[in-house]
Amino acid sequence: MTTTETTDTTQGERTLQVYRVYIKTTPEKIWQAITDPEWNARYGYAAPQHFELRPGGSFRSTASEEMRRVSDEMGYGIPDVVVDGEVLEADPPRKLVQTFRMLMDPAAAADGFTRLTYDIFEVAPGVSRLTVTHDVTGAPTLAAVVAGAYEDQGGGGGGGWAWILSDLKSLLETGSILAG
Amino acid sequence: MFKALADPTRRFLLDQLFARDGRTLTELESAVEMTRYGVMKHLRVLEEAGLVVSRKSGREKLHFLNPVPIRLIHDRWIDKYTERHVTALVDLKNQLEEQR
């Protein structure tokens, strides 16, 4: 995924990215891995995410202490809250809909709120399908980030949703992220 | 997945979705010299392999390229650099700022 356009579509006025992964686990475990900061800080960008799981509830992802330390060493500031939003729908363990705004830097913050949907479906006993649909309409910076565009620039800026979901699968199936 | 990728028409369909995602069967059909039924069959193989995810939108069925299965292969055999997780967010911020 090297360009913004790669996983985007424009249907009418909406720009969607859709990602799907099958995981050998139950929907409950996936739900927990997404919504519980004890779990969601263990894969992907590893910034803990805090949800108030009710419509209108708050969502925020905070920089971990280690991230702050690394950031300070490298001479950049990192905001305390790196992503914020609102929970729109919480139907455990099947569906979570939220808004999502990245506050990492001014350009991303200026993209404003996007809409993110997690759908979890048990396809067979102990095998679940997780579909992430990210409506990034009008949010070009965030669209590039979640498509993994910055990883390919050699700086290791994370591979977006494909990377996060691969990591999540590894964590739930093997107990660890892809460390080899 | 490798069987799905082995066919040139299916690779071409994925190329189409890579260039612009979320296409209907009719749009994809117009890009290849093949019957509607033929394109449907290829899309079904791609969907079964997880490389394409379809999504209903009104009366239309839109097809999206799903990069996750390819990512899984990449992460399993190529990329085992775990330290990146801690710094990814910091790197990302740095790169976003460098862009301007």
Image (tube, rainbow, N blue to C red):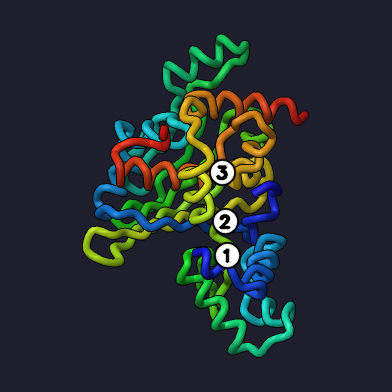
- Is A109 displayed left or right of A115 in the figure? right
Q: Pointer 3: what residue?
A: A113
Q: Are marks 3 and 1 in contact (CB under 8 Å)?
A: no
| Whole-percent x, y for residue A60 in the image | 43, 33
Q: Pointer 2: what residue?
A: A17
Residue at 41% across / 54% down in the picture?
A118
Are labels 2 and 1 assigned to the same chain?
A: no
**Precedes in sequence: disc 2 or disc 3:** 2
The one of B50 and A60 positioned closer to us in this rendering:
B50
- On what subunit does the disc labeled 2 rest? A
Calculate the distance from the C-alpha at mark 2 to the C-alpha at mark 1. Answer: 8 Å
The one of A114 and A140 positioned closer to us in this rendering:
A140
Q: Name the quadrant containing residue A130.
A: bottom left
- On what subunit does the disc labeled 1 rest? B
- Is A93 displayed left or right of B49 in the figure? left
Q: Name the quadrant containing residue B61.
A: bottom right
Are labels 3 and 1 assigned to the same chain?
A: no
Task: Kindly identify the amino acid type of the residue bearing the numbered disc 2.
Answer: Gln
| Whole-percent x, y for residue A11 in the image | 65, 66
- On what subunit does the disc labeled 3 rest? A
Q: Pointer 1: what residue?
A: B64
Task: Kindly identify the amino acid type of the residue bearing the numbered disc 1.
Answer: Phe
How many residues crowd mark 1 within 10 Å: few (<14), some (14–19), many (20+)?
many
